[in-house]
Image (cartoon, rainbow, N blue to C red):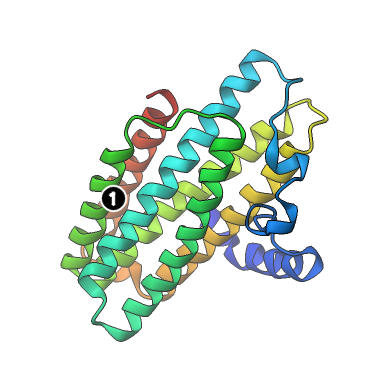
Amino acid sequence: MLGRRICHCSITRSFRVHARGLASSAYTDPTRGKDESVTSTPADITPEQRKNLEGALRVDQAGEIAANWIYHGQHFILRRDRKTGLLIQDMWDQEKKHLAVMDKLQLQHAVRPTLLTDVAKVAGFGLGAVTALMSKEAAMACTEAVETVIGEHYEDQLKELDEMDTKHPSIPLLKDVIREFRDDELEHLDIAVENHSQRAPAHALLSAVVGAGCMVAIELCKRV
């Protein structure tokens, strides 16, 4: 399970941040706004690789939209609980940054956004709010399940990108961004477990339902 790799990923991320800064800063630092790695897309990849790249970024953008609205729904219900509200706000703030970067990647690589954007917003808010109404532990169980699927999804994307034969600088940067975001999502998973996600009533069933829903959403957003 990816969740068991949390500590390793967190340590790796801390070293990476100290050594050379976050990869996503390429999209948030105005001084890098003219770099080829953030302004253009590779022309030397096959049609199949282009299709895979567009599908990956379409799903990533949709996933970050959904994640933002899940945390929005959780925060709406639990914001008055000082500890839990602050935890959710911190994770939500990180997801806002992820979405801002994914929006820029979508434009850079000329990727059509999913047609299910509004569905992702409504479903995300509903999932976050309903699980938060169930209990704090259920909200954390939702986070655990969602971040497990997203972490595994990012890991699969990295393997696909490793097979992409191109000299364009945007692809190594994209891989670094995905690694960074994967580590962030696994950190959220770790936070959920530390805050008693596995004490939620019917934890196994809730995790299975939420996880299955996420996997279906991923496949739909690739195509629609």
Q: Residue at x 46, y 36 (%)?
A: 59
Eyeballing the image, is 109 above or below 210? Answer: above
Q: Position of residue 219 (x, y in %)?
A: 40, 29
Q: Position of residue 210 (x, y in %)?
A: 30, 48
Quadrant housing residue 156: top right
Q: Residue at x 76, y 20 (%)?
A: 44
Q: Position of residue 92 (x, y in %)?
A: 41, 65
Count of all numbered marks drawn on residues in the image = 1
Name the residue that disc number 1 marks: 124
Disc 1 is placed on an element classified as helix
Eyeballing the image, is 159 above or below 33? Answer: above
Quadrant where the C terminus is found in the figure: top left
Q: Position of residue 66 (x, y in %)?
A: 36, 48
Q: Residue at x 34, y 34 (%)?
A: 216
Outermost residue toward the bottom in this view: 82
Eyeballing the image, is 93 above or below 67? Answer: below
> Is the residue marked by circle 1 packed among few (<14), some (14-19), or many (20+) residues within 10 Å?
many
Relative to 36, 58 lies left or right: left
Relative to 31, 121 lies left or right: left
Q: Is residue 183 visible?
A: yes
Eyeballing the image, is 32 above or below 42? Answer: below
Name the amino acid type tagged 1: Gly
Quadrant housing residue 133: bottom left
Quadrant housing residue 183: bottom right
Q: Is residue 1 visible?
A: no
